[in-house]
Amino acid sequence: MARVLFVCLHNAGRSQMSTALFERAAGGRHQAESAGTAPAERVHPEVVEAMRELDIDLEGAQPKRITREMAEAADVVVTMGCGDECPYVPGKRYIDWDLPDPKGLPLAEVRAIRDDIARRVEELAAELPEGES
């Protein structure tokens, strides 16, 4: 079972969607966690709404700050817009996804970001070896 850490700036949009969609795509074969370099107080409302359309409830999700321990525990770290603020742990696989921040965007644009993330996490879940950890 592989552990994936999704990291963005506020842990209130991209990384929250990525974690939820990855867990759905992985179907229990892998684990995911999310964090941010400067966490917001709550998940962006437009993200909550877009995910609710897929029967995923992020209303109670709490953004959290990334720690070095989180990065060390992960097999794969997916970064989205946090730049040099993400901790670097030698030997870890890093992937950078260039995705816009959904904060304040119209729902149609948030859906497009969500759907892009869904495609990416499905590919990632499919390529990870099940014995990795």
Image: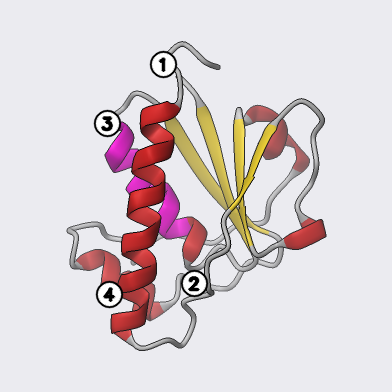
Q: Percent from the top left, x then y, of residue 116? A: 37, 60
Q: Percent from the top left, x then y, of residue 17? A: 40, 58
The mark nearer the N terminus, 2 or 4, is: 2
**Dot 4 crowding, Cα within 10 Å, few <14, some 14–19, many 20+:** some
| Left or right of residue 86, residue 2 in this image | left
Q: SS of the residue at dot 2? A: loop
Residue identified by numbered label 3: 27
Give the residue type that dot 2 points to. Answer: Arg
Q: SS of the residue at dot 4? A: helix
Compared to 44, does 116 lie above or below?
above
**Dot 3 crowding, Cα within 10 Å, few <14, some 14–19, many 20+:** few
**Dot 2 crowding, Cα within 10 Å, few <14, some 14–19, many 20+:** some
Q: SS of the residue at dot 1? A: loop
Between the residue at mark 3 and the residue at mark 4, the CA separation in whole angstroms equals 23 Å
Quarter-of-image position of residue 106: bottom left
Residues rendered magenta in the picture: 16-26
Between the residue at mark 1 and the residue at mark 2, the CA separation in whole angstroms equals 33 Å
Give the residue type that dot 3 points to. Answer: Gly
The mark nearer the N terminus, 3 or 2, is: 3
Between the residue at mark 2 and the residue at mark 4, the CA separation in whole angstroms equals 13 Å
Quarter-of-image position of residue 55: bottom left
Magenta stretch, main secondary structure, is helix
Give the residue type that dot 4 points to. Answer: Glu
Residue identified by numbered label 4: 49
Tag on residue 130? 1
Q: Percent from the top left, x then y, of residue 130? A: 41, 16
Residue identified by numbered label 2: 42
Q: Percent from the top left, x then y, of residue 61? A: 42, 59
Residue placed most toward the observer, 129 or 17: 129
Q: Are marks 1 and 2 in contact (CB under 8 Å)?
A: no
Which-is-in-front pick, marks 3 and 2? 3
